[in-house]
Image (cartoon, grey):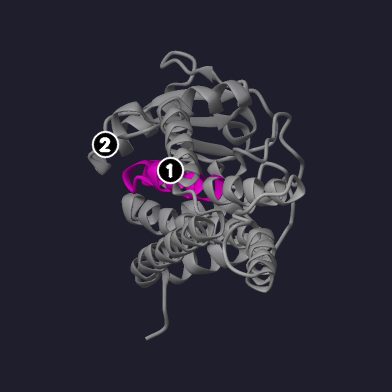
Amino acid sequence: MAANLYTLAGRNVRKTWFLFTVFLIIVIGIGYFLSIYYGHPGILYVAIAFAIFQSVLSYWFSHKIVLRMTGARPATREANRELWNIVENLSITAGLPMPKLYIIEDSVPNAFATGRDKKHAVVAVSTGLLAVLERNELEGVIAHELSHIGNRDMLVSTVVVVLVGFITLLSDMFLRSQIFGGGNRDRGDGRVQGILMIVGLVLMILSPIIATLIQLSISRKREYLADASGALLTRYPEGLASALEKISAHSGKMQKANHATAHLFISNPFGAKMRGLFSTHPPVEKRVELLRKSI
């Protein structure tokens, strides 16, 4: 039987956890190498503590940071009655607390969800999205965003960002130390130190690139998963499929697009048509195809 949206959902979950495992192996490998090279594991512990502290702060206040970066304002039931009713009804169906609603003043249609957990979740939509979508299409988009909340994608995203940041931090520390003469110079002969330095340089240059590619891959998998979960929530995949086509037809860049938050949106806020390994989102054509196969 050909794979459809729903069979791919389980596969995407497994692939996501596989990529997490690869991530952790890279982190442990780098840590092990640095502990041997420097002979001072205390440096590694400080770096880990700093990365964890920074990530906890980012995770805890992520929704406030993102809302400020996008310039979103709170929505009200009186001014946004249709949107409010859709979110309220779908939240009940999904068994989720109703998230706080925000509006982004931007003519480019887009939406995102954020928040550290289900009780502190936020859904924001642009004025452009409200202007171009029909009710069933808007329901598809909201169901997609609620699925991100239900699937704990903010937690997943935060863990990934932490791992990427940690790897980049260690890489930067190592490369800077070489400029100023780092390493444990008292260990063994010069040839061993030379080999370690070459291996270290290659590892530290490539690791952040590999980590970023894994981060983007996980982001794409979570988008497919949210599509599947959203379609199951509304029982009408065509609504989301049609919405994605309309959103992708508006190729303009959002006024406050930011690379740090690009992965949160349902579609790339830069309006970029970047494909392949360096894309934050799967191709819209593929997403639409999978949605319509599930009908």
Residue type beneath disc 1: Tyr
Please identify the quarter of the rendering in which residue 132 is found: top right
Mark 1 Cα shell of 10 Å, populated few (<14), some (14-19), many (≥20): few
Could you say whether the residue bearing mark 2 is in a helix, strand or loop? loop
Q: Quadrant of the C terminus?
A: bottom left
Please identify the quarter of the rendering in which residue 12 is found: bottom left
Q: Which residues are magenta?
A: 145-165
Mark 2 Cα shell of 10 Å, populated few (<14), some (14-19), many (≥20): some
Label whose residue precedes the other's in the sequence (2 or 1): 1
Residue 46, how many percent across, how many down?
Answer: 46, 38
Residue in the picture at 64% in, 38% down: 109
Q: Is residue 152 magenta?
A: yes
Q: Is residue 136 magenta?
A: no
Which secondary structure is most common in the magenta stretch? Answer: helix
The number of discs equals: 2
Residue 153, how many percent across, how many down?
Answer: 40, 46
Task: Note whether residue 71 is visible.
Answer: yes
Residue in the picture at 66% in, 47% down: 172
Residue type beneath disc 2: Leu
The residue pinned by badge 1 equals: 45
Residue 49, how many percent across, how many down?
Answer: 43, 37
Q: Is residue 271 left or right of residue 109?
A: right
The residue pinned by badge 2 equals: 96
Please identify the quarter of the rendering in which residue 95 is found: top left
Q: Is residue 280 above or below residue 206?
A: above
Could you say whether the residue bearing mark 1 is in a helix, strand or loop? helix
Front residue of 163/10: it is 163
Residue in the picture at 47% in, 27% down: 63
Task: Note whether residue 295 is visible.
Answer: no
Front residue of 87/63: it is 63
Q: Is residue 122 left or right of residue 166?
A: left
Closer to the eye: label 2 or 1: 1
